[in-house]
Image (cartoon, helix red, strand yellow):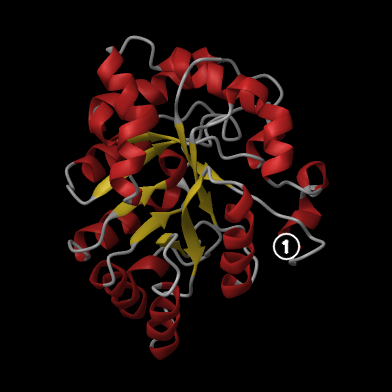
Amino acid sequence: MNFPFIDSHVHFWDRQFLPYPWLAEVPAIAGRHTPAELRLEASSGLPEKIVFVECGAPASDEVKWIETLAITEPRIAAIVAKAPLDAGPATTAAIRELQRHPLVRGVRHLIQDESDPAFCIRPEFISGVRQLGEANLSFDLCCRHSQLPSVIELVRSCPGTRFILDHAGKPGIRARLLDPWRAHIDRLATLPNLDCKFSGLITEADPANWTPADLQPYVSHLLGAFGPSRLLFGGDWPVAKLAGSYPRWLDAARQLVSALSAPEIAAVFHANARRVYQFP
């Protein structure tokens, strides 16, 4: 497949080296997933570059493991590391430590499983996110669509930090819910310090029966709101395997944006990831 692209959202794990307790809940993908397994599954459709996104292992250990993988897998161009952003002095120390690792370009602190809808707008969390901007690190927002109102407030409160909305805010595709997700996306799109990942949609749809047509209303709205200059393709491998293979999602993603011009497609699948995650 002669289609150069960058994957802005890839996970690797190997429980032989690091613990991932949450994988016990998803045995279908709990096995070893490293660049070797990705090469086997993607075959000729491998990305040119990869942005690794944290998987829940101890932060420092995970970063060091990915740095080891990157020695023999030069496709790994950037790391989005785990860090606690609501821990006061411990947050400051964690960010300072991450700055010592050149591949680390951003941080993720999961919001999606927090029961308090206002969790991400607590003062201590906002303080931690602002420190990321000061350290020239971005913040990947992983939330559910019901949490988007607080996410909007967080992004507005941290104009000096670059945000990336993972998986388009996890819209309710399975239930065919478009609203109020569309209104929330429109509000986020007015904020210049946020880009959006065109990723993770097949696992928000019916995993066993989704088609590109199920995803099209959501992708069309993302394009209308953000335009092709602020959308980044992400494979979300291997989590996406719960709903389809790597080649199947890549083919669907290309189909979903096929009405764009060649330069616009290149932005979504290539240039935007380089800009957001700051690698050549």
Quadrant of residue 185 in the image? top left
Q: From the top left corner, tell me how far across and down residue 243 is, in percent.
A: 68, 29
Q: Residue at x 79, y 60 (%)?
A: 15
Q: Is residue 13 above or below residue 21?
A: above
Q: What is the secondary structure assignment of the residue under circle 1?
A: loop
Q: Residue at x 60, y 59 (%)?
A: 66
Q: Is residue 45 above or below residue 68?
A: above
Direction from residue 265 to residue 90 in the image, left or right: right
Most foreground residue, 130 or 11? 11
Direction from residue 200 to residue 164 in the image, left or right: left
Q: Residues within 10 Å of mark 1 (few under 14, many from 20)?
A: some
Residue extending farthest to the bottom is 89
Q: Residue at x 61, y 48 (%)?
A: 11
Most foreground residue, 37 or 147? 37
Query: On the rendered image, what quadrant is the N terminus found in?
Result: top right
Most foreground residue, 252 or 110? 252
Q: From the top left corner, tell me how far across and down residue 279 is, in percent.
A: 35, 48
**Kind of residue sitting beneath label 1:** Tyr
Most foreground residue, 161 or 120? 161
Q: Is residue 107 above or below residue 124?
A: above
Q: Is residue 234 above or below residue 30?
A: above
Q: From the top left corner, tell me how far across and down residue 260 is, in percent.
A: 30, 13
Query: On the rendered image, what quadrant is the C terminus found in?
Result: top left
Provide the residue designation for mark 1. Answer: 20
Q: Residue at x 80, y 56 (%)?
A: 24
Quadrant of residue 154 in the image? bottom left
Quadrant of residue 156 in the image? bottom left
| Residue 97 visible in image | yes
